Image (cartoon, rainbow, N blue to C red):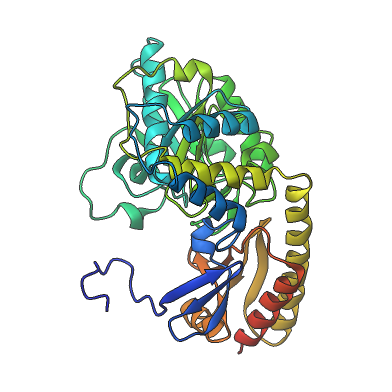
Amino acid sequence: MSEHLLHNYGPRGLTIARGQGSWVWDAEGNRYLDCVSGVAVNAFGHLHPPVVAAIRGQLESYLHASNLYLMEPQVRLAEALCGAMGMDKAFFCNSGTEANEGAIKFARRHWLEKGAAGKLRILSFASSFHGRTYASMAATGQEKIRTGFGPLPEGFQVVPVNDVAALRAAVGPETAAIIFEPILAEGGIIPLSGEIAAELILAQAQGALLIADEIQTGLGRTGEMLGAHALGLRPDLITLAKPLGGGLPLGAVLMREDIAKSIHVGDHGSTFGGNPVACAAGLAVLAELQREGFLESVRTRAGGLRKRLEDLMRRKSAQGIACGPVVGKGFLTGFRYGGDLEALQKACRGNGLLVHRAGQDVVRLLPPLNLSEGEIGELIDRLDRSMLK
């Protein structure tokens, strides 16, 4: 069936036939609680009615016009995002890696326009993940992502995560920007410490731009609109993607006005970026996130999930299973697991539960942000039955 697909993803093991809310069904009709959510893309699960309605509405007008022209859904989404995030300008693209590529280009061009042509170095953290195109790959702090692809762009430096002394030593007059995830999701759900956040603020005051990679942490995933704001950080550039398009490809770079002034006609672009159908979906996603009390409810339900996970870890540890502690924040959560993680994923699938992994030893849970209390109970019950010694 998949003989013509490039085998870069490994065995899939499951053919998704349809989805509804927090659930998916395979080709044989088996039902699964989806705690992968398209890798944090389906923020409101599958076929969320407001998102579907927004997509259908735009389908009646036009699908694509290109950035040669103004497109009303794109203009509205730029205004809404900048208002929600406290930024001034938005650039739209199609994915997270494109957003990070754009942010890196914009940061370097900003300093060139300021007359600081030597201010080129981009710092990032070990275990980070910023994408698989060349500049974002050079910024990614995982050797396995970079190995085997020839010379990478120059001017990137990876420093140990949460090492204040190392970051302080790396920041200098040549530092253009520091790109960071508030929680290093792919690398093992590693939160940035308060101490490193304070050091980032100091580096920003000394002239380094802060690029917040909020592709997985932003738009409600941690229970906040942005993970960086919970750390007391006010980034100069913010990158978004994953949930932004409601399941359609959409990324964005948000930036301050003075950085936007450094970018001129022809400096950057995208054929599909800001597609009107994806932007219509994005407006519906943002409206759902901004409903009164919604993010507070995410924090409450995620707190309940965390407590139940911690209880499960204690019970399983008492049974001799190497697991815990619980890691993460909001509905970007999981736990360390000392056994065969691939076997556990397979066991979960056999019990009607889809989970993901992060780093070497973390079971990652990325359920929809509107996961119900009953579904949280289902999650814990299915995980419990899957974690056998």
The residue under the point 34% across, 50% down is: 132
Residue 172 horizontal/vertical position (percent)? 46, 24
Give the total of numbered labels.
0
Taking 98 as reference, is 323 left or right?
A: right
In this rendering, the answer to whether 130 lies above or below 301 is above
- Residue 137, relative to residue 346: is it above or below? above
The residue lying furthest to the front in this view is: 60
In this view of the protein, can residue 170 be seen by the observer? Answer: no
Nearest the eye: 34 or 206: 34
Q: Nearer the viewer, residue 148 or 217?
A: 217
The quarter in which the C terminus is drawn is: bottom right
Q: Residue at x 59, y 20 (%)?
A: 205
Q: Is residue 356 visible?
A: yes
Question: Which x, y percent locates residue 157?
Answer: 39, 38
Quadrant (top left, top right, bottom left, bottom right) of the N terminus = bottom left
9, above or below 223, in the image: below
Percent position (x, y) of residue 236?
Answer: 54, 26
Nearer to the camera, 199 or 35? 35
- At x 28%, y 66%, the residue is 8
Q: Residue furthest bottom?
A: 389
Residue 345 drawn above or below residue 49: below
192 relative position to 360: left or right: right
Identify the residue shown where x is 37% and y is 75%: 12
Which residue reaches farthest top? 115
Give how far across and how far down residue 328 sits, in percent: 64, 57
